[in-house]
Amino acid sequence: MNIIFVGPPGAGKGTQAQVISKTFKIPHISTGDMLRNEMESGSELGKKVRDIINSGKLVDDAVMNQIVKERLSKPDTKNGFILDGFPRTLNQAKALDEILSSIGKKLDHVIYVDVPEKVIVERLSARRMCPKCGRNYNMITDPPKEDELCDDCHVPLITRDDDKPETVRNRYKVYLELTKPVIDYYSAKKLLFTVDGTLPVREVEEILIKMIEGKK
Ligand code: AP5
Ligand code: MG
C-alpha cells in the first residue's frame, strides 16, 4: 500500500499518517520530520535548511528528490509507505513518478486533507510535538494526558519554530502557489481521495481506514 498525504500546513497530515502507519504497518516518511532531524543533529544539510524552513519557504527540489529517492530504496518500504509532505511541487511529483517506476512501484492513494486557512493558524498556534517520536498534540483539541509530556515517550513536548503566525501565513501562501497544482495533478490521474480535515481526529481516522480497507 503506497500512500501520499497532501494538504495545507496544519491540515492533520502527520496526525493521520501516524495512525495509518501503525494500522497498516507501513513506514511513515515525513520529509518535514527528516529535515527537522537534520537540523537537530547539526549536519551540513540541517544548517543549510534551517533558515529556509523557519521562513516558511521550500527546500530545493533537487535536494528533496534525492532524500526521498534514498529513503524509498530502504527495505522497510517493501510492503508500502506513507509519504507525508512530499511531493509539494509539480517538479517533485514528476520526480516521484520516475523514482517509483525505476523501483517498480506505483501509488495506490493520494489523500488530500482539506482544511481552510482560518482553522490552520488557530490549530498551529496550539500544536505541540514530541521531539522523540514526532507525535503531534494540540493543547486545545488533542492534549496529552500529562501536562505537556508525550503519552508514549514521557518527554517534554516542544513547539515548532515555524509555527509562529507570520511564518504559518507564509507557508500557506507557498502551499497555494506551489502545492495546490500537485493536488490537481493527482486529481487528473484519478488517484485523489479528499477527506474533510475539519472533522474530529477520530472521525478522519475512521474514514481513511475504511477507504483503505475497502480498496486493499
Ligand atoms: P512539514 O513538516 O511537512 O510541514 P507542513 O506541510 O507545513 O505541515 P505540518 O506538519 O505543519 O502540518 P500537518 O498537516 O502534518 O498537521 P499535524 O498533523 O501536525 O514541512 C515543514 C517545512 O519543511 C516546510 O515548510 C518546508 O520548508 C520543508 N519541507 C518539508 N518537505 C518539503 C518538500 N517536500 N519540499 C520542500 N521543502 C519541504 O496537525 C496540526 C495540528 O492540528 C496538531 O496540533 C494536531 O494535533 C491538530 N489536529 C490534527 N488533526 C486535527 C483535527 N482533525 N481536528 C483538530 N485538530 C487537529
Ligand atoms: Mg506534519
Image: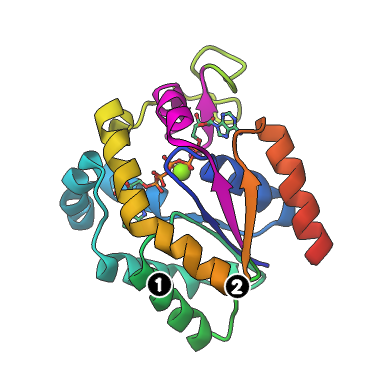
Residue situated furthest top in the rendering: 147
Discs 1/2, front: 2
Front residue (pair 90, 16): 90
- Amino acid type for the residue under numbered disc 1: Glu
The question of residue 134 being in magenta is answered with yes
Q: Which mark is residue 176?
A: none
The image position of residue 155, as x and y in percent, is 48, 25
Which quadrant of the picture is home to ligand 1? top left
Q: Secondary structure at mark 2?
A: loop
Residue 56 lies within the magenta run: no
- Disc 1 target residue: 70
Magenta-tinted stretch: 110-139
Residue located at (77% from left, 56% from top): 211
146 up-or-down from 47: above or below: above
Neighbor class of circle 2 (other Cα within 10 Å; few <14, some 14-19, many 20+) is some
Residue named by callout 2:
107
Q: Secondary structure at mark 1?
A: helix
Quadrant of the snapshot with the C terminus: bottom right
